[in-house]
Amino acid sequence: MHARKPRNTDLHIQDFLLHPIWGFVEEDGDEVQTIDYPDSLVLPIGGDVLFVLCEYQFNDGTRLNGVVFVRLLDQSFYILAFPRHDGSLFDYPVHSPLAGTVTPEQLASNLGKTVDEVFPIKFETPFVFENGKKLIGEYAFPYHLNRKRANRQK
């Protein structure tokens, strides 16, 4: 039996610790459910989007469980989600039309860190796609990249 929630916005980090992968019940609906995967921890390729438990590593070396939103079509990530103190998730859109709606400073503040302590953000899930690729990524917002390059040139 699959666990279900009325909307993906109702998911908390505790839901992902119990069931690491969630997806939409219907392509155009809001209801989400857990996605079963084989013992080999291979993610199914199909459907549109998955919400997957991950471990983030911040620039200061600290780690935190969170969630990455993944487009299955090209296995790209488009939202990084971080737990708040109450377990709800704080979304940080990166490769989506919503990118830029949350500033790096807002994310850092939510995490109780400075921007330099947060970025770049690395993430990794324990899952492997059917094509054998592990879901691993890194995100550094453009300001941080430009600042890093400027510091190297000094």
Image (cartoon, rainbow, N blue to C red):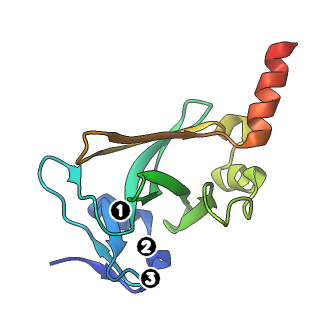
Q: Say whether marks 2 and 3 touch (CB < 8 Å).
A: no
**Outermost residue to the right:** 154
**What crowding class fits label 2: few (fewer than 14 Cα within 10 Å), some (14-19), or many (20 or more)?**
some
Lateral position of residue 91 relative to residue 2, left or right: right
Q: SS for tag 2? A: loop
Query: Which residue does the numbered mark 3 point to in the structure image?
Result: 7
Relative height, residue 119 to residue 73 (above, below):
above
Asked if the residue under mark 1 is in contact with the one under mark 2, i.e. CB atoms within 8 Å, the reply is yes
Side of 148 relative to 85 (left or right)? right
- Observer-nearest of 39 and 72: 72
For disc 2, the marked residue is 11
Between 60 and 69, which is closer to the camera in this rendering?
69
Disc 3 marks a residue whose amino acid type is Arg
Position of residue 64 relative to residue 102, above or below, is above
Estimate the spatial distance between the alpha carbons at disc 2 and disc 1, rounded to whole Å: 8 Å
Q: Label 1, on which residue?
A: 16
Marker disc for residue 145: none
Kind of residue sitting beneath label 1: Phe
| Farthest left residue in view | 39
* Earlier sequence position, callout 2 versus callout 1: 2
The spot of residue 131 in percent (x, y) is: 25, 44
Rendered location of residue 124, percent (x, y)? 41, 41
What residue do we see at 44% from left, 58% from top? 70
The tag earlier along the polypeptide, 3 or 1, is 3
**Are discs 3 and 1 less than 8 Å apart at CB?**
no
Residue 71 figure quarter: bottom left
x and y percentages locating residue 16 in the rendered image: 35, 62
| Rendered position, 81 above or below 117 | below
